[in-house]
Amino acid sequence: MTLYIDHEVCLREPCCPAAEVCSTKALVYDSRENKLFFNVDLCNGCGQCVQKCAYNALALFETADELTAFLTKITKARETFASKFISLLGLKERP
Ligand code: SF4
Ligand code: SF4
């Protein structure tokens, strides 16, 4: 089981409800780095953190392959969105 943290979406709340609900401390907020950290060795896969995040910044995956497929999908979606946005503004994409 592995947890994906979308650091672009995450609000980096010091009192992150998702980290607070994690009983094993697999998900913690680091105030020095101002970001969440995940320790796969401590995670029991309960999924409570994912349910607590109201911003969909977290996603849980059974295998590394599932995570890779997800990352490929969102990267393509973001590229498509960026391309359409650039086109909408009448700008040219870099070659
Ligand atoms: S609740 Fe979600 S968006 Fe807020 S800090 Fe936690 S993971 Fe990030
Ligand atoms: S799935 Fe459960 S154990 Fe793993 S990080 Fe989330 S709350 Fe913690």
Image (tube, helix red, strand yellow):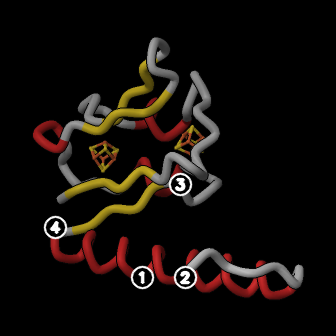
Return the residue at label 1: 73
Q: Residue 41 or 83: which is nearer the viewer?
A: 83
Cα distance in 3D space between marks 2 and 3: 16 Å
Name the secondary structure under disc 1.
Answer: helix
Q: Are marks 1 and 4 in contact (CB under 8 Å)?
A: no
Cα distance in 3D space between marks 3 and 1: 16 Å
Residue occupying image coordinates x 17% and y 59%? 1
Cα distance in 3D space between marks 1 and 4: 14 Å
Residue occupying image coordinates x 26% and y 67%? 61
Q: Are marks 1 and 2 in contact (CB under 8 Å)?
A: yes
Where 5 falls versus 13 (above or below)? below
Kind of residue at badge 4 = Ala
Cα distance in 3D space between marks 1 and 2: 6 Å
How far across and down, in percent of the image, does residue 7 sit?
50, 46
Instruction: Report the disc number at residue 57.
Output: 3
Name the secondary structure under disc 4.
Answer: helix
Cα distance in 3D space between marks 2 and 4: 20 Å
Return the residue at label 2: 77
Where 13 falls versus 49 (above or below)? above
Please identify the quadrant where the C terminus is shown.
Answer: bottom right
Kind of residue at badge 3 = Ala
Between disc 1 and disc 4, the foreground one is 1
